[in-house]
Amino acid sequence: MEHLTPQIIAGETGGKYIGEEESRDIHVTGAVRDNRDVQPGSLFVCIQGAKVDGHTFANSAFEAGAACCLAEKPIPGATGPYILVDSTHDAIMALAAYYRGLFSIPVVGVTGSVGKTTSKELIAAALGAKYRVLKTISNQNNELGVSLLLLSLDERYDVAVVEMGISEHGEMSNLARMVRPDIFNMTSIGYSHIEALGDLNGVLRAKSEAFAHMKPESVAILNGDDDILCGYDPGIRKILCGLGERNDFRAENISSEGTQAVTCDVVNGMERLHVRIPAYGSHLASLAPAAVAIGRLLGLTSEEIHKGILSYAPVDGRANVIDTGYITLIDDCYNANPHSVEAAITSLCVLPGRRVAIVGDMLELSGLSDSLHREAGIFAARSGIDRIICCGDKAKLAYESYRSSCTGAASYYRDIAQLMTALPKLVKKGDYVLVKASHAMRFDKLIPLLRVLRSEI
């Protein structure tokens, strides 16, 4: 970590230093929000949550070796120095923006309604063949998560890949003000958070706030298969990536190796690079061109990009394949929207054997919710899955439209408790079972049950 001290932190956040004079210039070596993650020299950020007040753990953080705390109210009996600010949330963003400016390494920002976490992992894997990469962990892509990631930069890293997730207008500006990406990858414009963002053009406006915080020589990597992004002018150099002919980098000759891998050729002009992505999901081929394009921009050879992509591994809850010995479980339950549900079902349907889709409500779709759930059911019917199992108020509409569109097996359950009771009767040995729903549906509760399922009842 570059040199940070309580004195500098107070100056950059507009805060008041409280503590002994000799502690003003001690070296701060990182930032955390959980006292259990404190390392000697850490800055502990006290967050006032709905259920837990981080200020109550300040002295525990000092005991663990924290050099300093960032707080928005006095810490009674503080055993170490702290910076008192009006808002720890705003202060940590200001500090992250300052700290990011101390580094000249390339920074890649990744956003999109669908596929941003997978794209982030694929890009980081490709770059990892040549560079030491700092990347967003899991889905810590909000203002606080991005702030803490940037504050973990140090001389170990050659490049950073930062996932940038939003749900409201203005959030991307806050993120981009900190990240200041040199390359900005937008995977798609879809219905995620449509309730707050209004419509698809509102989603585009919210995500494109980033371009106001990028240098003129920066590059936008956009999904050329997305009709909205294809025609969008970001005001900087634009490279289109995807499957269609209009893309600068496009994937061809896509082939699936069951649940083991997806292969394709990524074509750019006269150049052709064969890549093998060792994971499940035909959608991976559509994300590979962006990873290749970014690798090229940052100076990687074809051999390095290919080697890096071979190291890709999916994040838990995102098309993670689990062979239980009884079924093949596809854990894709982290979140869901219309585009990701269609992609998940498409990938399921290329697998041999009996295909079962367990789907739940897709949330935050506002007035479009009913029609989009019905369309999901129709899409599932036309795709040829063998059984659909629906759970949730809105998922009932998908169940009904599936039933009216085909003769495939279908079941509906009002809530997850009912579903868990019935599930052993619905799944057979050898099935490929997809689990997909919005995060708030808590379909992650199904995964332990499906992991141990061994016999029909």
Image: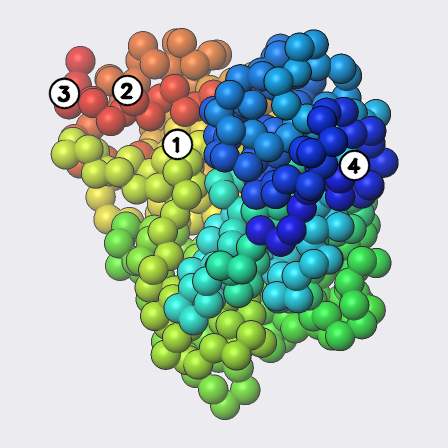
Towards the viewer: 402 or 195: 195
Q: Name the residue carrying label 2.
A: 449
257 versus 439 height, above or below: below
Query: Is residue 165 found left or right of 388 in the rendered image?
Result: right
Q: Earlier in the sequence, mark 3 or mark 4?
A: 4
Q: Secondary structure at mark 1?
A: strand
Which three-letter amino acid code belongs to the residue tagged 4? Ala
Report the Cα–Cα distance between label 1 and label 4.
47 Å
Which three-letter amino acid code belongs to the residue tagged 3? Ser
Q: Secondary structure at mark 3?
A: loop
Closer mark to the observer between disc 1 and disc 2? 2
Q: Are marks 3 and 4 in contact (CB under 8 Å)?
A: no
Disc 1 crowd rating (10 Å Cα; few below 14, some 14-19, many 20+) is: many
Q: Earlier in the sequence, mark 2 or mark 4?
A: 4
- The scheme the figure's colours follow is rainbow
Q: Secondary structure at mark 4?
A: helix
Q: Name the residue carrying label 3.
A: 455
Q: Secondary structure at mark 2?
A: helix
Closer mark to the observer between disc 2 and disc 4? 4
Closer mark to the observer between disc 3 and disc 2? 2
Disc 3 crowd rating (10 Å Cα; few below 14, some 14-19, many 20+) is: few
Q: Residue at x 52, y 52 (%)?
A: 135
Q: Name the residue carrying label 1.
A: 435
Q: Earlier in the sequence, mark 3 or mark 2?
A: 2
Report the Cα–Cα distance between label 1 and label 2.
12 Å
Report the Cα–Cα distance between label 3 and label 4.
61 Å
Q: Earlier in the sequence, mark 1 or mark 2?
A: 1
